[in-house]
Structure formats: C-alpha cells, structure tokens
Image (tube, helix red, strand yellow):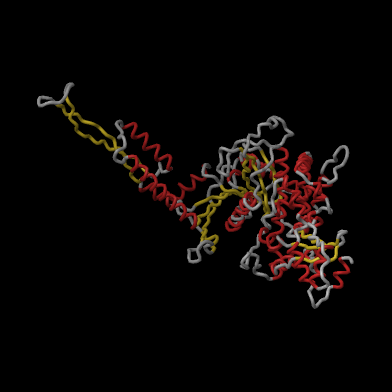
Amino acid sequence: MTAKKILARLPADALSLARIFSLCFRRCQTPAQLPQQTARPPRTAEGTVALFWQLTSLESLEVGAAPLVHHFLHRLQLRQLFEQHLPPLPGRQPALSSAVTLTLLVTNLLLARQPLYALAAWSARRVPEHIGLQPGQADLLNDDRCGRVLDHLQRTDRASLLTALVLHAVHAFAIDLTELHQDTTSVTFSGEYAEQLPTAQTERPPRITFGYNKDHRPDLKQLLYSLTITADGAVPVHCKIYDGNTSDDQVHQDTWAFLCAVIGHSDFLYVADSKLCSRDNLNFIATRQGRFLTVMPRTRAEEGWFRNHLQDHPVEWGLVHSEPNPRRRDGPDHVYHGVESPQRSSEGYRVLWYRSSQKEEQDRHSRQQRLLRAQVRLDALMAPGRRPFRSQSKAQEAGQRLLQEERVEGWLDVVIDRVVTEVYRQVGSGRPGPRTEYRRVEQWEYRLRLVEDGEALRREARCDGLFPLLTNDETLSLAEALGKYKYQPFVEKRHEQLKSVFGVTPVWLKNVGRVESLLWLFYVVELVQALLEREVRRRMTQEGLDSLALYPEGRNSVAPTAALVLNALEGHRRHRLLDKQGVELRRFHDELSPAARQVLDLLGVDRTPYGLS
C-alpha cells in the first residue's frame, strides 16, 4: 500500500491529519528518512500511522523574508541588470551564472550575513525558488565560486551598472532627487594587505591603507566609503570606494559630477559636511549652475569675524524653528534662532547663522568641564610630594602645555608665584657636632595657579550655541536651510546600519578587488533596505496606520525599520510530506503572525509562498 493510499484511508475519528503531521515532524529530522519498522504494525489507527512513517519523509525548509526580498529585487530588476552589464566569460560557461550568484549574495547579506564558505549551507536550508535557485543548485555554491563571481563583478563597468540601477530605482519607486545628502565613513580592515597594485596605476582597486579612521582605530588600515542619499526616504543613489588615505574634501567633485550625469541636470541641492567648504569644491559646483549647502568650519575667517561682530553690535535674531525635546518629555523645547550674516563669504556666498538652545547648553557644559579638568590637573601638578619647579621657565612651559592640551588658553591665565624657603646647611664636611657651623640658604620654588579671564569667558558665552551654514541658493529661507541641513544625520544613520545591522566588518577577504566588489554589493543591500523602509512607511500613511506591532513583545513601531520588517517574517518554514519516490503528498506552513500578514498586505507581496491565498 502506498503512502498516498494510507493517507486517504486514515480514519478521521481516530487521528486527525494535523496530529499525523505533528507526529511526523517530532520524529523526523529534515530531510532524513523516517525510521523503518521491521515488524508489521497492528491494524489500528496507531499502527496505520507507524506504517505511514515507513513510507514517507518530511522536508522542512525555511521561507522567512526571502519572498519579500525577492519582491524588491524583482522590482529593481537586479538580476537582469547584472546579466546586461557583466562582461561575457571566456570558455565554458559556469553551471551557475554570475548574475544568479550575485543576486543570491545580496539576499544573504540582507537576511543573514555569512562568510562566503557558509553560503551553500545557508542556501540549502532555504526554499530554493525564493532565493533565485533551482532545486539542487545550492550544492553548486562554494567559496571559490563566490570569489570568482566577485572577480567577475570587479571587471565590470560598475559606474554604468550603478547608473542603470539608480535610474531604474528612481523610476520604479518614484524617488524625488531635488535634494541629496553626502557623507563618508571608514571601513576598517585587519591584516597587512601588502600585495596591492601601486598608487600610480589608474585601473586598480582602491588601496587598503592607513588614514583618518572614523572608527577611532588609527592602528588599522581602512577604505573610505562615500554614500549619497536622497531627502525622500534616505534612499542611497551613489556609492564609491576610495583609497584609505583619501581626505573627505577630495570626493565631492567626483560625487557631484556623477549625480549630474544620473539626474541629467545640475538643478538639485547638494548637502554635505564642512569638508565641502573649500574654495575649489564650492566654485566647482557654483560655476556649473549647481546649488550647495554646507556647514562652515571654524577655520574660516568669516566665522571669527561674525563672533567678533556679535560682541559689539546688536543682532536681530529671529525664531526659526522649535521642536519638543526628543530625550526628555519634561525637558525644555529645542529652539533655533537665525540671522543672515551682513557679510558674505570671501567667494560671495550667503552665510546663515543659527543659535541652538540645545547646542548652547552643550557648549556651556563643555566649557565648564574643560575649566574643571584644567584645575584638577594643576592641583595634581602642585600636589605635595611632587618635585617642585626650580626655574620660572620650566613652570611657565608646564602651565602653557596644560592650557593647550585642555584647550582653555584663551580663558585662563597662568600666574607663577615664587616661594622662598630658608634651609640651613652644614659648613664643611664631616660628622655634625657641637662646634659644627651652619649657614642659611634661600631656596626658590615656583608654584602655578590659574586665574580666569572674566571678559574672555563672557565673550565666549555670548557665542554659545552658534553654528553657520554656507549656501549659494538665494531662494532658501533661514527655516528652509536649517530644515534641509537637519536631514544630514540620516546619512550617518545609513553608515551606522552598514556597520552594525549588516556587519560590514570583519571582511573575510584578502583580495582587494573582491573586497571592492563586496562593498559594492553592500551598497545594493543599503538600497533595498532604504526602499523597504520607505515603502512600508509610505503605505502606512496611505492606509492611515499610525504604527505596526513589529517588536517581539508586540509593542508598536511608529517608523518600522527594515530589520523589524524582515524579522517579522524570518523563521517561517514550509513543510512537505514526501513519499519514497519524492512525490509530494501534502504541503503545509508555519502560521504567520498578524503583524507579518499586515506587512505582506501593505507591500503587495505575493502571499502564496507562505501558504496563504
């Protein structure tokens, strides 16, 4: 009797079909065969089930969030773009194409970042069609094949591929490109990476070398990772990897030119940090009819001029923006006042000054802490038991060094007091006795003390909370310019997610060309993540939903992240009951949570892979 006939003849009142599946699932290990029974079981319901175990096996594969990821990759047409731009391979074609493997790598990086050698095991636990594979193709994956695929991507014209990908994403998701924000971060590497092409060679991967490490690891080498996002959902539209010793001010002209080529014109606002504020960068954009907005560094002369101007001239500050305190409900509101500087920059651009109540408090606290640290260090320097200063020059040098290290030289003055003490020394040598003569000797000791410069501290307090923005956009109001610059931290949030959520480091690769290709795939991961978050939040607004219950304990999320959405679906499995010939008898799925069903409906994802109609 076949398993299919047994399944049809099982008495419904003796044991339900759900009970059979439960027993099979508890007794079987996926995808191993069910235990064999040598003796013929009795003709009872339990005996029928035992015979059923002999003739069937249970396959359980994970579905998870792979169909959701596939939905977005399909909308981006990522696999087709890879097929169009990857150069043809000479000789015999591989059993698994590079386009399929690269798309699979992106899915893996989004869901469960694994080393390349673990990709095959991860794929074997998944339903193959949901990750772009055919049954049995997971066995073709190994670290050598993945490495060769990364080499294939490295030989590709990635600038053209990036342009095509961004243009398709902009068209498919209707992304607004009128305001773009740029920032850089460092990707840190452990290892020597000695075998790299020389710097003079033009066609080469970026060099992993020492530079200004933003992870505060100057002992490690790095690459510079530049990212540009839109103000419409923080969607990444540009990415480029540079040598580790590249300074931030060297990437802006290249980035801005690429954005112009993608958008087709220069009529967009380019927002970046203070490294943009160099004469060459600003003039490069302005002379090509571009618009920029950046923060002015304190090294500029215009910055010092306004602070001095503020001391002796009345300034008409106007209320620009006010918002509730995001950290303390009972705390004071964050208030911004603004005024346009009466003097433009040396290049002729507008300088917009702002006073932030939050920054004002931070500046005041920082100044007090620096003054306190300076006094504590001086007390330790003058503590009893320490060797005293015997010369005024040594004391003066130590005091000035202390002020410079604590950055309080403009607020404190070092005063040196000479202390004279009398000591008696024996005249001549020998053991002291009743007739020994002594002479009085004066010893000079120099002691330091700090005196506050009250006028300098009052002048500095008048500048608490100030920061300037520089722009050549004549149409921006003070409130608009501030609002646009306040979106800049979203680029840093993308960097934080790259390093923490997706764990870009450690990079388990030693070939620099493969490293560059892998980082390029991480850009695609960030793009999919941003589009997912943007789409969920946009659909929530359209449906009038204030939140989704995506946290593990059922708490509501007002602004769902990609990690929350993906985690709501991860762990879902598909089970198949198979006979000895591998013919499917029954198929059933784990139950989806209401929040997961809601996410699928919001995003318009096909529910069939989850066993739902």
- Residue at the extreme bottom: 13
- In the picture, measured across the screen, residue 419 lies left or right of residue 454, that is left
Q: In this view, does 391 lie to the left or right of 470?
A: left
Q: Which of 607 and 8 is in front in this view?
A: 8
Please indicate whether residue 282 sits to the left or right of residue 40 in the image: left
Q: Locate the N terminus by quadrant.
A: bottom right
Q: In which quarter of the image is residue 87?
A: top right
508 horizontally vs 466: left or right: right
Q: Residue furthest front?
A: 39
Name the residue nearer the viewer: 76 or 193.
193
Q: Residue 195, percent across and down?
A: 68, 31
Residue at 33% x, 31% y: name it.
393
- Residue located farthest toward the left when viewing the structure as drawn: 435
Q: Measuring 77% from the left and 53% from the top, which residue is drawn there?
A: 124
Answer above or below: position of 195 versus 519.
Answer: above
Residue 11 drawn at (x, y percent): 83, 75
Q: How many marks?
A: 0
Question: Does any portion of residue 272 appear in the rendered image?
Answer: yes
Q: Quadrant of the C terminus?
A: bottom right
Residue 510 x %, y %: 69, 37
Q: Which of 480 and 344 is in front in this view?
A: 480
Q: Is residue 156 at all visible to an observer of this figure?
A: no
Q: Residue 44, percent across and down?
A: 81, 73
